[in-house]
Amino acid sequence: MADFTANGPANGQAGQPQLVLQKIYVKDVSYEAPNAPQIFQEVGETEEQPQVQLNLGQKAVDLGNDLYEVVLSLTLTCMLGERTAYLAEVQQAGVFGIAGFSEVDHAGIINSYCPNLLFPYARQVLSSLVLEGGFPPFLLQPINFDALFAEQQRRVLSGSAAPMLNS
């Protein structure tokens, strides 16, 4: 278990902002290759390039006592023409202790810092699923959660979107 705080190691000082990573785990995982084994032949025979789509989501649940479960959801869909080559999904989760931060900083931690921390784990699970499913390795590029959160905040301030989380 790793402890992170805004002011060095966790020292139990009341009022000091604290950010503690308690657990990282896979909450849910799914893989489907609905058109296997025929799709493997099609991949080699057609000149059509596979189309890959990534859907990203996240949610946070207040567990009480300044603990939050943050879940990063990644769904990777690979299509070859009109047929699904594979569908891989992972929900990578973490339990974080977050206390003593302003509301703005708290939202940034939940919506940016936590997903940034969870993403490499989710990326590894997706990559393994695709490879073990018999397809060429898929390298998922890094995602800038800071920029995504900043854009969401901009939309909220302009009134064109609902807030990401009610935490």
Image (cartoon, grey):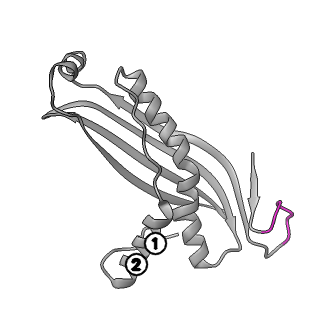
Say which quarter of the image contains residue 151: bottom left
Task: Give percent across and percent down for residue 34.
Answer: 24, 25
Task: Give percent across and percent down for residue 40.
Answer: 24, 18
Q: Residue furthest front?
A: 47
- Is the residue marked by circle 2 packed among few (<14), some (14-19), or many (20+) residues within 10 Å? few
- In the rendered image, residue 8 lying in the magenta stretch gets the answer yes
> Quarter holding the N terminus?
top right
- In the rendered image, residue 31 lying in the magenta stretch gets the answer no
Q: Residue at x 85, y 70 (%)?
A: 13
62 on left or right of 35: right
Question: In the rendered structure, which amino acid carries the disc numbered 1?
Answer: Ala
Considering only vertical position in the picture, is 80 above or below 150? above
Residue carrying label 1? 150
Task: Give percent across and percent down for residue 44.
Answer: 21, 19
The label number, if any, that marks residue 154 in the structure image = 2
> Which region is colored magenta?
7-13
